[in-house]
Image: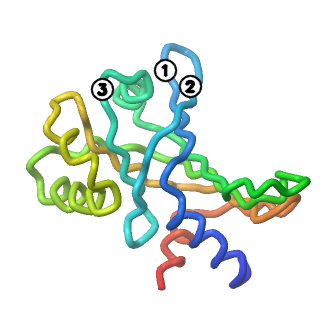
């Protein structure tokens, strides 16, 4: 990736708060929307989800997911020129009370403080998506296949 492409991807990951979450269960793919927080090393994406939601049940059965993000649509003539990325990999249900959970919870709440009350509900779980691969498209016809190490390289 060029420096410009790396900067575009870094900005997309840091500025986006809402992405399309893809899971699979009951022999069918399923896409929904979820808020997320990227971890400082760009190798983990935190999701705080209710077990009542279909996507959460699917992730608990099959701990693999994909999170797709796109640059904000600014009304340009060709939306295919918008930067976008799809991150795919295993999902870990973080154990309540662990140091890892507490640190992830603090990071999530620093981005979404209004979610604080939801952490008190038993049906909400905190997950970490650990992308093993990503498909980054900085613009039309410019697809880049990335590994976890490429994401980690986005750190300042």
How far from the left and from the top, in percent, is residue 12? 60, 65
Residue to which mark 3 is pinned: 51
Please tell me which of labels 2 and 3 falls first in the chain.
Answer: 2
Q: Could you say which quadrant of the image residue 37 lies in?
A: bottom left
Residue to which mark 1 is pinned: 25
Please tell me which of labels 1 and 2 falls first in the chain.
Answer: 1
Disc 3 crowd rating (10 Å Cα; few below 14, some 14-19, many 20+) is some
Lateral position of residue 32 relative to residue 98, left or right: right
Residue at x-position 72% and y-position 81%: 4
Q: Secondary structure at mark 1?
A: strand
How far from the left and from the top, in percent, is residue 34? 46, 41
Lateral position of residue 130 relative to residue 132, left or right: left
Q: What is the distance, in whole Å, between disc 1 and disc 2 at their CAs?
A: 8 Å
Tag 1–tag 2 contact (CB < 8 Å): yes
Disc 1 crowd rating (10 Å Cα; few below 14, some 14-19, many 20+) is some
Residue at x-position 40% and y-position 31%: 59
Please tell me which of labels 3 and 1 falls first in the chain.
Answer: 1
Q: What is the distance, in whole Å, between disc 2 and disc 3 at their CAs?
A: 15 Å
Tag 3–tag 1 contact (CB < 8 Å): no
Lateral position of residue 94 relative to residue 43, left or right: left
Q: Which mark is residue 58?
A: none
Tag 2–tag 3 contact (CB < 8 Å): no
Residue to which mark 2 is pinned: 30
């Amino acid at each position: 990736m060029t420096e410009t492409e790396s900067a575009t991807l870094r900005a997309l990951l840091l500025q986006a708060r809402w992405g399309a979450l893809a899971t699979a269960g009951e022999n069918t793919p399923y896409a929904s929307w979820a808020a997320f927080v990227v971890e400082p090393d760009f190798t983990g994406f935190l999701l705080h989800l209710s077990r009542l939601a279909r996507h959460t049940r699917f992730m608990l059965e099959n701990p693999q997911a994909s999170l797709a993000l796109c640059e904000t649509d600014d009304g340009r003539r060709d939306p295919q020129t918008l930067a976008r990325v799809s991150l795919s990999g295993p999902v870990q249900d973080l154990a309540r009370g662990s140091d890892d959970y507490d640190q992830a919870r603090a990071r999530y709440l620093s981005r979404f403080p209004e979610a604080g009350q939801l952490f008190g509900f038993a049906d909400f779980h905190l997950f970490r998506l650990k992308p093993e691969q990503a498909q980054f498209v900085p613009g039309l016809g410019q697809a880049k296949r990335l590994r976890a190490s490429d994401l980690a390289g986005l750190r300042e």
